[in-house]
Image: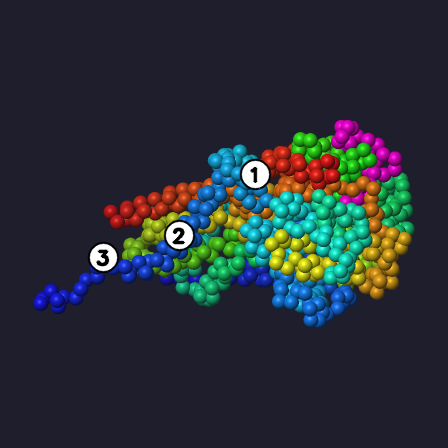
Amino acid sequence: MRKVFFPLIPILVIAAMVLTACPAPAPTTAPAPTTGEAEGETYATVVEAGELVPPVVAQPCEGDACFCRDKTVTVIVNTAGEKGPISGPFYEVRDEFEKATGAKLEIVEVPFAEHFPKLLTDLTTGTGQYDTSIAGAWWLGDLVGGDYILPLDDYYNDTTGKYPKWDVEDVQPGPRDLLFYDEKLYMVANDHDGQVMYYRRDLIEDPEHQAAFKAQYGYDLKVPDTIQEFRDVAEYFNGKDLNGDGTPDNGLTMHLKVGGQGMFHFMSFSAPFVIGPDNPKLYWFDPETMQPLMDSPGHQAAMEALVDLIQFGPEAMMGWSLGESWDHFLRGQAALTFTWGDLGALAQQEGSQVKGKTGAAPMPGTTQYYDITSGQWKQVEGVNKVGNTTGGSWAGVISKFSDAPDCTYFLLALMAHPEKSKVYAYRGWDGVDPGRFSHYLPPAGTNTIDGYVAAGWDPGDAESYTFAYYENFGSELMFPYLRIPGTFEYWTALDIHLSEAATGQKTAAEALKATVDDFNAITDRLGRDLQREIYVKSLGLE
Amino acid sequence: MAASETPARPRRTDPTKFFFIMPAVIWVLLFTIFPLLYALYTSFFSFRFGRINQFVGFGNYLRLFTDANLHNGLRVTLTFVIVTVTVQMLLGFALALLLNREMRGKSVLRAIMVLPLFATPVAVGYLSITLFYEINGPINELLRALGGAGIPWLSNPFWALVAVIIIDIWQWTPFVFLVSLAALQGLPADLYEAAEVDGASAWQSFRSITLPLMTPILWLILLLRLVEAFKVFDIPTSLTLGGPGRATEVYSLFTYRTALRFFDHGYAAAQGFLLLFIVSLIVALLFGRIRSIYQEERS
C-alpha cells in the first residue's frame, strides 16, 4: 500500500482538541439556579464569595432538650454547592442545627431541572424521603393543590420557645403574601425575589454625559422613571465605552435564553402596561372564563417595547441565562439592566467592576395602561409603577410525609432568624435576597448602614439598593404572581414565545397569540373549572 | 448391560436450564416488558398534580396529530437526523479510507480521531456553551482573527441548530470512522493485488471492490446512527435548551418536558410510542435492506 503522510488531518484534529480544551474568558456554566427557573443555569463568575458568615443564634441542647435526637432531617435543594446560592447557607447552619436539636441534617443537592420532579415523585408516592424542599413560590399551586405539604401556622404560633423565632410581619407585604396560600402559612421566609432596575450611578451623574444627553434628548439625564426614559438612556449609552477598556459597550443587558428566565423580564416589564389603579389584579386570565388575557393591547404594547429595547443590548443575550447577563453588568459592559437582588450584592464582591457605581430603583413605569376590565387605555397622573415579586422566592416547605416535621421547622426557622437573614441579604453569592424591614435602612427599616459597610458594601450602593427594594415590595400596585397548578408550564410557554419574538421568528402579536393558544391548551388539559376555582382563590377574588 | 454403560443424555425437561435462563427472563420482564406495558397503560390517562387523573382513551394519541409544538419537534429532529447522519457517514467513511493505509503516526492519529466518542454528550454540550460563546468565545475569536465576523451561534435560530449539528458531527463521526476502518482492514488484500495486476486504477478498485464489499457494513452503521440520532437529547438540552424559541427543540427534549417538567405523563408516553414506531419502521426497512444484500451475496 502507498505510504502517505497526510499532515492536514492531525493539524485539524489537534486544533479541534485544543479549541475544546482551551478556557475561554466567557462565563463557565454550572447548573446552579439562584432565582426563579433555569435549566442548565449559570451564575455570575466575575466575583468571588467572601468570608462573611452569619452569627450562631441557637444554643447547643443537652439531655431531653435535644428533642430531635436520632432523627434525620433531609432537605432537597438546587445543586449549587457549599458556596452556592440557596444551598450554601444549609452547609453553614448544619453544625449549629445538629448541636441545637440532636438531629442529623442531610443535604440533597439536585440539578434545578430535577428538583421539582424528584420532590413531586416523592410526594405522590408518599415515600417521605425529603422532609423539606427549598421550593419556588410558584410550586405552591401544585403542592397545596395536591395536599402534599403541611401548613405551618401551629409551629409558627408556638409559644413554648421550642423553635427559633422569626417574624412574618417583618417580611414586606409583597413577598409575605407568597408565604401564604389560602390564608395558611406554608413557607418559612428565606429568599425574597423581585426585579428592580439597576443603573450605573457614575454614568448618570457624569456632567459630560448629562450635557450630551440633554443636547440629544432635550431633557436632563436622570434615573429612568418611565419605560420611554429607560429606552432613551439605553439608546444613549449603547455603543459607548462604559468601563474604560477601549471597546464599545451596551446600553442594557437582559437574559433571554429559553429556560434562562426571560419570562420574568417580561412580567416585570409589562406589569405597568396592564396593571393600574382600576385593574390591580387581572393580568393572566379572565377569572370568569379562564380565557388568557395575554394578547391584550397592554401586553402587546409591552412586548413590542421589550423587543425594541433588544437593539441596545448585545445580540448574544438572546442566548444568555441570568448569570451571563449579570456578568456583563458586573464587568461594566452595560449601563442598565433589571433583575433580582443578587446583582446588587454581587456588585459589592471582589472582582466586580461596578462597586460604588451601582444604583438601583424600582422598575420604570408607564403614563398609561390598558385596563382589561373596561377594555380601554387609561392615562394616569404621574407615572404608573407596579411592584413585583417575580422570581422563585425560594423558601422552605415541609412535606406531609415527613417523620420529623418539628425538627424540620426548627431548621427552617433557624435560618429565618433575623440576625442570620441580615447576613444572607448582605451577601451576593448565597442567593438570598432582601425583602424584610430588618434588611432596610432607616426610615424604611431597622438595619444600619454600618452593617452593610462592614459586609463590604459601598454606602451609596447600599442605600440605593435597599430603598429600591423597599419601594418595590411596598408598592401600592403589585404584579399578580401566578400560583395555580401548571404555573411552570404556562410560564414555559410564555418564555418560549418571548424568545421567538426577541429573535424575530414571530411578531409581538403572533408570539402573544401563540402564548394564548398554549395557555388554553394547558388549561383545558388540567380542567378549566378546577383551574378557575384555584385562580380565583389565589387572587383573593372570591 | 450395554444400555447401562451408555452415558445418560440430559432430559429435554431438565429444569436446570431454566435456572440459567431465568435471570435473563427476569431482566427482560422487569426492565423492558413491564415499563413498556406500564407506559402503554399510562398513555390512556390524563394526569393532574403528578397523579393519574382520568381515563382519556385514545385522547393522548389523538393529540399527536394536532399538537403543533410536537410537529415542530419532529421537524427539527428530522432536519437534525438528515444533516448529521449524512455528514457523519460521508466524513467518517472518507477518513477511514484515508487512514486505511501505511503512514507515519497512523496509530496516534487513529487514537486522537476516536477521542470525541469517549466524551459525555451532556458535558460536551455544556462545554460548547463556552466554545460557541458569541462575544469572546474561541470559535468567534478565531473567525475574527481570520478576518471574518462573529457568528450568532446561540442567539440566532438558524445558527443555533447549526451549532448543535456541528457538535453531534464532531462527536459521532469517529464512530463511523472506527467501524468503517475496522471493516476496511478486514477486506481481502488479494482482491486489490489482483486488480492492481489487471491495471485497475484506484478509483476502479474503490468502486468495484471496496464499495460493494463495504455496503452491508455501511448500511449497518447507517442504521445505528439513525436510531441514535432520532433519540438526540443531551446536546441540545445542555447547549440551547431547545431555543431560541423552539428552533432546537428536538423530539426527545419535547417529550422530556412533557413528562418531567409538566408532568403530563400520559401524553409523554404516547409521544414515546410514536418515536418507537418511527424508529422501529426505520430499523425494519434497513434490516430488510441489509438482509437482501446478504441474500444477494449468498446467491
Q: Earlier in the sequence, mark 2 or mark 1?
A: 2
Name the element at disc 3: loop
Q: Identify the residue under disc 3.
A: B12
Q: In the image, residue A280 lies at what x, y percent?
A: 78, 37
Residue drawn at x 73%, y 64% is A49
Give the residue type that dot 2 points to.
Leu
Q: In the image, residue A134 lies at what x, y percent?
A: 67, 55
Q: Is residue A271 above or below residue B96?
A: above
Residue drawn at x 69%, y 50% is A151
Frontmost residue, A148 versus A370? A148
Question: Is B194 left, or right, of A176 in this rendering?
Answer: left
Give the residue type that dot 3 points to.
Arg
Is residue A321 at least partly visible in the picture? no
Dot 2 alpha-carbon crowd within 10 angstroms: few under 14, some 14 to 19, many 20 or more: few
Nearest to the eye among marks 2 and 1: give it: 2
Quadrant position of the N terminus of chain A in the picture: bottom left
Question: Is B296 left, or right, of A431 in this rendering?
Answer: left
Q: Does the magenta stretch include residue A289?
A: no
- Which chain does the residue under circle 1 lie in? B
Nearest to the eye among marks 1 and 3: give it: 3
Q: Residue furthest bottom?
A: A62
Name the element at disc 1: helix
Q: Identify the residue under disc 1.
A: B69
Dot 1 alpha-carbon crowd within 10 angstroms: few under 14, some 14 to 19, many 20 or more: some
Q: How far apart are marks 2 and 1 (CA)?
A: 34 Å
Give the residue type that dot 1 points to.
Asn
Write down the region rendered in magenta: A363-391
Is residue B61 at least partly visible in the picture? yes
Q: Residue A82's quadrant in the figure?
A: bottom right
